[in-house]
Each structure stands twice: as structure tokens, then as C-alpha cells.
Amino acid sequence: MSSRIACTLGLDFGTLSCRAVIVAVEGGATLGSSVVEFARGIVTHGRPESIATQHPDDWERSARRACSEALSDAGVDASSVMGVGVDFTACTLVPCLDDSTPLVSLRGNEDRVHAWPKLWKHRGALRQAAELTAATVRADWPHGERFGGKISEQWLHPKAMELWDEDRSAFDAADLLLEAGDWFVWRMAAAADTATAASGRSAIVPEGAPPPIRSACQAGYKACWSSADGGTALLPDALLDSLRPGGFAPALAHRMRGRVQAPGARAGTLGAWGASLLGLASGTPIATSTIDAHAAVPGSGAGAPHELVLVLGTSGCFMLNAPPNADHAVHGCLGRVPDGILPGLVGFEAGQSALGDAFAWLSVLTGQSVAELAAAAAAEKAAARASSASAASALSQPLLLDFLNGSRSPYNDGMLQASASGLTLGTTPAGLYNAIADGLACGTRGMVDAFGDARDAASGDVAPIAIERVIAAGGIARSAPAYVQTLADALQRQIEISPVEQASAQGAAILGAVAAGVFPDARAAVGAMTPTPPGGVCVVRPDVNEAERYDALHARYCRLAELSLEERG
């Protein structure tokens, strides 16, 4: 028998699956959950080195099943779900018609690569990203420092330009270019009738409906938009026209129409079709979407300024909220976005392009599991510490730069390659694991130091951003305690482990509660919906005896990075 516990639904669309969680609004306990993988996974069209696409049918079918299973697991009545929150990978770009039909769903388009939504990790727009970056430098673009000084191939503008260049007819056929999270929420809130809901048709949004709501999170971090500048796109049309004369700039602006809102603001309520797909009641409020990594900030219990969240997954995403008047230039930051993570705060984003993927690469290379490598690495590290002075050992131990998939922060360069130092014939697989871990930790330390070295964007005066709390979330935060200890030692800061196993899904559920008006604001929602573990929050404290060694190791890391940059030119 179903119960009537007040709860919300969080939908977390990751790279390979959709996760649904039912979360109690009082105390934040997870009542039920389900994970359903996308049937097609990542579709590379025979070019895995550059192409990464997905089919929207997979997203909706996985969401339908995941919601049904999560509701059943929770044992709650659908009418108990007070709101829905959605997070999604980004920039995952969907070309679609104004009735929401994805181009790839139109007859004859499955074989057209550029009709497919391009996943966040798609790398086919490297040339366009380089052109855009060079143009911003030539134009002395005043907003460049907000986004790390470069335009990433993973962002919206390079992907849109690639579509223009490679398949102009597909670009022209698209009425809208939407982030996948915005597209999904738009369809869920569409006023489609029950016949449409039963038909399985791709056209969900009725004729004459208003344009979609766009999230300030995706628009800010992936499309250079800012509410602080009158709510405008910051890449000027003149710059875009200089690269693609012939109407690209106005054509893109038309396809990016829609009102921008903060994550958690109400985007609408479930229409008949959306309610049918999710198994919920029509009229249930649904929140403006957010990026999957960014949802982990509220999901980890961080609702206040000066709380740094390290999302440790296949890649690393580091996010810090600052007060609403913060306007700091931070070296290596890839976004400074008002309302970008939570309403009323300025969100800063940095990260690493390969984190868990780096350990997985070593596993494939050596034929040993990541768990086996981690255990051997911990033993080897303990033995080395017992037999040598910490600072002296840092000058010769193996070290690998965290550039195995390019550099996200601080260089924002997808073409940078990792360099190693200190390898000998005696270096073991465990030693390589420690070299990767130390390189990642030193890279993270560089970003933390950058917040301390921040400057006022207007005056250029030193204006540090304080970090009062550090929280680690994501799969590696729980599965690799030795790595979290390495981070704590390198940063010389204590690190809390997020009390929520699925922080992104939890964050989406919290934003669903905000959209439903259950709490007065996001900070109150985070406070009420962050569970307290029975044994208290796990805190990893730094070993003060390692401080000197990591000072020396980080200095060596910086020298090695400078050499790599010189070689890159």
C-alpha cells in the first residue's frame, strides 16, 4: 500500500544513465531510487576520437522506467510528490523543431551525424573553439577572464558553429538549439493533450506555445551568458560575424531564444504528457534545470557562500559559491555566473578533464583493477614515508601532470598532454597510481590557491575569496578514501565526505522542492533536506607532517606544467 509522505523527485541524467530518486522533504532521506542505462549509450558514428552523440528517445525511455521503479521502491503515492527537479550533462546540445521534435527523430535523419544531440564530451568542434578563442583575444573581449580566457570545444558556440559548418541544412532545419536539460523540462511542462501523451509522437509542444525556459546554469557556464549584464549573451554578434559572415550570428540568436532563469526557479508544471511519462500528477511543479555536477552542490549540503564542493567522478568539477556582490577575477576559473549554481549567489566553476578516467586508464594499461592499484599504492606510499624525509622524497618521486584528457583548469586547453617526471625502471604500477593521484591533488591545490589570489575584476586589487568549508562528493569521494586523504594532505585542509551517495540526484530533488515553494529559498531547502548520517559526517583531516612534502611537490608540479606549456607553444 502506498504511503503519503511529502517528497520530491530528482532526475539525474548522467553520461550513460538516468537516475531517479524520491527524497523526503523533511530530513532529506532517500525513500526510493532507480538507475536505468541509456539503450544506445554514446553513439560515435565510427569516430570515437571526436564524435559523441546521444538519442533523446533513450533519455525519455530511461526516465519513464527509472521514475516508475523509484516510486515503487519508495512505496509512496504519486500525489505525494510535490515537485520535480532535473539535472543534465552540459553542454549537450539538442537541435529541434519548435514543437520540440529533435531533428534526429525526423524520418531519414538517423544517418546524419549533425542532426543528433552532441554530448558534453563531443570533441568535433576543436577547430571552431580555437577560432572563437583567437577572435576573443584579437577583440580584447572584456569578459574573457570570466571564462578562463578561452572558449572550450565542449561549449555551445563551437558546437553550434560546427553544425553551421558541417551540415548547414540541419542548422537551417533546427528552430531551436537547446541544452538537453532545458529541452527535457520544456517537454515535461508542455500543455500536450492526452491523445498526444498516448501517441508516442515526438511533437509535444503545441503550436503557439511560449519559447522554452533556459537555465542560468547551462547558459552561464556553457554559453557565456550573464544576468549581471542585463541578461545577455556576452559573445558579441560582431565577433561571431567576423568568423562566419552570412548570417550566423542572428541565426544563432534566433535559435537561442527563451527566458533565462536560475536553477530551482519554477519552469512550469507537468502537462498531461510529462505527467504520463513520469507517472506523476498533472500540475506538479517542475524546476528549471541545472548541470549534473552543479546539482551536487546543494545535494552535498552546501547552500551558503564560501563552501567549496569537489565533485570527484570520471572528471573533476570544483564549485564555490560567493556572495551576490562578488565580482572576482580568478585565474583558471571557467565560469563566474550570478545565479549559476543557486539563486542569489555567484557561482565559480573549475575542474579537471580526467580524474577517475585517469585511474581507469592506468587500470587498462596494467591489467590490474583500480582497487588493486589503490591498495598497492597505499602500501608503497606508507613504506616510502617511513624510509625517507618527506620534502626530500618529493624531489625525486614519480609525478604525472593531470592533463591526460587536456586541461580544464587552469589552462582550458583540450590539446595539452600529460608529462611525467621521476620515472625509473623501478617504478611500479602502484608508483604510477601515486604519481597520478599526486598530480591531480597538486592541480586541485593550484585552483584552491587561485581563489586565495583572486582580484577584484574592476580595480584589479587583490580580493581573496575565502573558503570556509570543503566537501567531496561523487563516486571517488566514497570509493577511494586514500585519494581523498591525498587531497587533504595536499590542500592542508579538512575535507567532509558528502553524506549523500547520489549528490547530484539529491540536489535535483532539492531544487524540485524550491520550485514547489516548499521552502522560502534554496538555502533553507538545503538545510532541511541534507540528511545527517547515524555516525555523523565523515571528515578527512590533513596530516600536518605531509605539508612540507606537498609544498615541494606542488612547486615541482608547477615547473613541469610550465615546460608542457612551452612545448605546446
Image (tube, grey):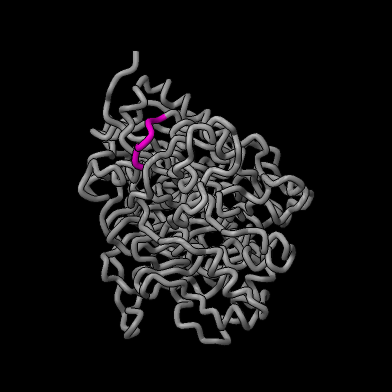
Residue drawn at x 63%, y 63% as measured from the top left? 159
> Does 247 appear above or below 472?
below
Instruction: Name which quarter of the figure residue 226 lies in.
Output: bottom left
Q: Nearer the viewer, residue 432 or 16?
A: 16
Instruction: Name which quarter of the figure residue 95 lies in.
Output: bottom right
Q: Nearer the viewer, residue 19 or 269?
A: 269
- Regarding residue 379, the answer to whether it shows in the image is yes
Q: Nearer the viewer, residue 433 or 181?
A: 181
Which residue appears farthest toward the top when viewing the image? 1
Q: Please name the predominant secondary structure of the magenta segment in the image.
A: loop
Instruction: Name which quarter of the figure residue 126 lies in.
Output: bottom right
Residue drawn at x 59%, y 78% as measured from the top left? 240
- Where residue 50 appears, as percent x and y from the top left, is 72, 57
Name the quadrant of the C terminus: bottom right
Is residue 309 rendered magenta in the image?
A: no
Q: Magenta segment, which residues? A: 280-285
- Where residue 503 appears, as percent x and y from the top left, is 40, 41
Residue drawn at x 56%, y 54% as measured from the top left? 98
Q: Nearer the viewer, residue 522 or 48?
A: 522
Q: Is residue 549 left or right of residue 38?
A: left
- Regarding residue 450, the answer to whether it shows in the image is no
- Where residue 2 appears, as percent x and y from the top left, is 34, 17
Name the quadrant of the N terminus: top left
